[in-house]
Image: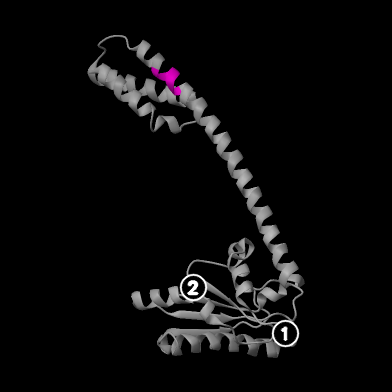
Amino acid sequence: MKNKLILLLQVLSLTSFAQETSALNNESKVVNIVHRFDQITGREGNCSDSIAILTAKLAELSLINEELLRDNKSITDTLQEFKKLLCMADRNFLVEKYGTDDLESDYKLEQYTDFKQNYFLKEFLNKKNETLVFFPFNKATANLKMYREIDSLVALYFTEKKTTFKICGYSDSKGVEERNSELSKERAEFIRNYLVKEKKVNSKNIKTEGKGSKSKERFNETELDFLNRRAVITLN
């Protein structure tokens, strides 16, 4: 019986006990279990050799586990540093390419692709079940047919019952806030009309809001102000 217990403890040492980082704690657990077994069944012989072998194995596993934890921390730290560098690089890319753009330029497929693939925007703007739509300066129209994400949201809308669209429009800080507030509402309404007319979404299931240029969700840095010309579509 005791041999079976030792075998069981050896198996356990490769699973749950291996998660412990302290060999001393593992040894104590093994000794306590065997001691309790002796109390119940009485001693059938000295099993100190088996305990010694088992605790030595646990000590070995503990060292391996500590080494893995150090390696994992190193990998995690490296990955976090890489993400920061990638985020900054993609931020600078947007600023250099679009931060000083012609204010009258249209929002084209190339810009849509650059924005969609940009890690900086994914980290700071995109959330689950959200779609970002960017607009040209002082305009409330965009080529929404480029946005396949909208098609995905619409498909989910018709699949799931009792779902509602929420569209929030924003603007940059140029000009007066009264006009910016109106422009942000127009952007949200433009997307609403597209969903109703082109995608046959029930207008009762769409809520719109104009956030203007004073929202907490905006970019406060002047060189990133062009990223505030957007609307966010959420399916709840």
8 left or right, relative to 229: left
Residue placed under numbered mark 2 in the picture: 149
Residue 203 at x, y = what percent? 43, 89
Residue 168 at x, y = what percent? 56, 80
Residue 121 at x, y = what percent? 62, 66
Q: Can you say which quadrant of the picture contains the N terminus? A: top left
Residue range of the region highlighted in magenta in the rendering: 54-58
Crowd band around label 2 with a 10 angstrom C-alpha radius: few (<14), some (14–19), many (20+): some
Image quadrant in which you'd find residue 97 = bottom right
Residue 224 at x, y = what percent? 72, 71
146 left or right, relative to 161: right
Pick whichever of labels 1 and 2 is earlier in the sequence: 1
Residue visible at 24% across and 15% down? 42
Answer whether residue 236 is visible to the viewer in this image.
no
Image quadrant in which you'd find residue 116 = bottom right
Q: Is residue 1 magenta?
A: no
Question: In the depicted view, which residue is nearer to us: 43 or 213?
Answer: 213
Residue placed under numbered mark 1 in the picture: 104
